[in-house]
């Protein structure tokens, strides 16, 4: 969600990131606001517990797993620089398959993995920029896949590609699977299940990827939520408005990066905005693993009308239904969390500047948070409760929320796939590693191959 022209400055221990926001967050021909869309509706369902157990039993332990089993847990949990070095050393020699490389500005992720001795295999669309990293000795292997195929076909192609690595003397059997592209998380989770590898729960991933399901689970768990209404047909607009009220926010339940998120002030505004967003979603297609706008939209008012183009209709990629929810006042923040064994081992709040309405374009950020301690504590609890309510027990998570006049409220929670901000020069990531001694990429890679050992304290943390 970070965008525009950035600048980076520091003041009294705070790090500020500022942006010149675009005049409007609208898709125009050729723009690519998302890296890749992978649908959960046409992907295989989650494996039953017995099926997963059989897959795990049949999986021959790799040298990496065997090494991990021989190291006493107390050594891995040391709160020291030596403990940190040991945990990072465990990554050396591990083979990790990365599903979708993401844009080229994620290259620093792979450079960091190479520094740690990780053998990375990138599986991405043909002619992806990631292929060049093989010649640069950054990644071990690149496997091109036709990402315009139907999702079931795509899943089977990727699954076969990963299995074939067992016979490749250069990399061998994979130790884990991960992705740094948010919308590829459902695919990665299902691949982990199919191969008996450590990974996030498919059910939890699908809840986190569906904003309406996330709201439902918060309510079901007795946690603070907000009024919302799922809109599957334009005839429901009046009912939605009566239930939610105004001002409100209209958003796709499966979007990313503020795609299609817009504030509406009254009924006329809702009807007008709904028509624009449906038209927008209907005019999107995926091509070569990226999202772009079709120049001419051949649909009247419904997303379900197919677009005849050489890409994939976005309906096959994200849930195109919309949700109306109440507009939240207050201070917006990002909360970064690391969970291990069902316990939050690290939590950090990053302030987000006032968003540019009605498109909610972020303007700046600061870390650590400048909010009062009691607000920060409340936001941390909100984020941790949300992650736990969804059902996640291990992993790195990015939670967005606000401290409203009624207290902390969730905007969304998802698997973490990027640091919170970038440098102005776009030549590397300025993550939370510097102020907190947490290397988020290392944490994500370690969870990717099953090292669920985490050692940390709130004020001095070693990743």
Image: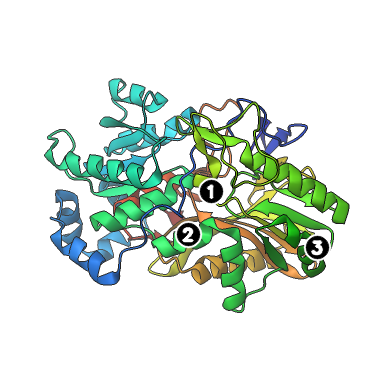
**Distance (Cα) linking label 1 and label 3:** 25 Å
Residues at discs 2 and 1 in contact (Cβ within 8 Å): no
Most foreground residue, 317 or 415: 317
The answer to whether 377 is drawn above or below residue 333 in the figure is below
- Quick one: SS at disc 2? helix
Q: Residue 2 location, x and y as percent? A: 63, 39
The answer to whether 31 is drawn above or below residue 255 in the figure is above
Question: Comparing marks 2 and 1, which lies closer to the viewer?
Answer: 1
Q: Residue 372 location, x and y as percent? A: 73, 62
Q: Is residue 162 visible?
A: yes
For label 1, the crowd category at 10 Å Cα-Cα, with few meaning under 14, some 14 to 19 and many 20 or more, is: many
Quarter placement of the N terminus: top right
Q: Residue 184 location, x and y as percent? A: 44, 45
Quarter of the figure with residue 447: bottom left
**Distance (Cα) linking label 3 and label 2:** 28 Å
At x 28%, y 36%, the residue is 121
Report which residue position mark 3 lands on: 238
Question: Comparing marks 3 and 2, which lies closer to the viewer?
Answer: 3
- Quick one: SS at disc 1? loop
Report which residue position mark 1 lands on: 318
Q: Residue furthest bottom?
A: 222
Report which residue position mark 2 lands on: 206
**Distance (Cα) linking label 2 and label 1:** 11 Å
Disc on the earlier residue, 3 or 2: 2
The answer to whether 90 is drawn above or below residue 300 in the figure is below
- Quick one: SS at disc 3? helix
Quarter of the figure with residue 244: bottom right
Give left or right: position of 89 versus 231: left
């Amino acid at each position: 969600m970070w965008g525009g022209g950035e600048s980076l400055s520091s003041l009294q221990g705070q790090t500020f990131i500022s942006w010149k926001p675009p005049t409007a967050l609208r898709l125009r021909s050729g723009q690519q606001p998302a890296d890749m869309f992978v649908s959960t509706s046409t992907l295989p369902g989650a494996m039953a517990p017995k099926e997963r157990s059989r897959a795990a039993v049949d999986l021959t332990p790799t040298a990496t797993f065997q090494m991990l089993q021989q190291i006493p847990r107390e050594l891995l949990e040391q709160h020291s620089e030596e403990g940190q070095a040991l945990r990072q050393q465990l990554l050396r020699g591990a083979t990790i398959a990365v599903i979708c490389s993401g844009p080229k500005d994620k290259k620093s992720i792979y450079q960091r993995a190479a520094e740690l001795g990780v053998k990375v295999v990138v599986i991405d669309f043909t002619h992806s920029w990631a292929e060049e990293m093989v010649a640069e000795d950054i990644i071990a292997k690149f496997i091109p896949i036709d990402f315009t195929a139907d999702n079931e076909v795509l899943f089977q192609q990727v699954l076969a590609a990963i299995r074939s690595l067992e016979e490749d003397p250069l990399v061998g059997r994979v130790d884990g699977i991960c992705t740094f592209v948010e919308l590829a998380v459902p695919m990665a989770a299902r691949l982990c299940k199919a191969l008996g590898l450590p990974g996030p729960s498919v059910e939890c991933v699908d809840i986190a990827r569906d904003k309406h399901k996330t709201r439902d689970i918060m309510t079901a768990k007795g946690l603070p939520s907000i009024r919302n209404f799922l809109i599957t047909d334009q005839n429901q607009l009046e009912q939605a408005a009566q239930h939610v009220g105004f001002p409100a926010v209209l958003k796709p339940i499966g979007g990313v990066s503020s795609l299609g998120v817009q504030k509406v002030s009254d009924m006329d505004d809702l009807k007008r905005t709904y028509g624009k967003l449906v038209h927008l979603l209907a005019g999107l297609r995926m091509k070569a693993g990226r999202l772009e706008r079709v120049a001419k939209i051949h649909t009247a008012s419904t997303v379900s009308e197919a677009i005849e183009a050489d890409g994939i209709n976005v309906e096959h990629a994200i849930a195109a239904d919309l949700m109306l929810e109440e507009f939240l006042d207050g201070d917006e923040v990002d909360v970064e969390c690391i969970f291990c064994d069902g316990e939050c081992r690290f939590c950090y709040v990053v302030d987000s500047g006032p968003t540019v309405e009605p498109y909610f374009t972020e303007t700046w950020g600061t870390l650590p948070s400048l909010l009062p301690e009691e607000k920060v504590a409340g936001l941390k609890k909100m984020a941790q409760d949300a992650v736990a309510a969804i059902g996640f027990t291990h992993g790195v998570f990015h939670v967005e929320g606000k401290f409203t006049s009624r207290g902390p409220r969730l905007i969304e929670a998802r698997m973490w796939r990027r640091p919170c901000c970038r440098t102005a020069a776009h030549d590397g990531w300025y993550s939370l590693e510097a102020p907190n001694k947490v290397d988020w990429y290392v944490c994500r890679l370690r969870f990717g191959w099953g090292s669920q050992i985490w050692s940390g304290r709130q004020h001095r943390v070693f990743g």
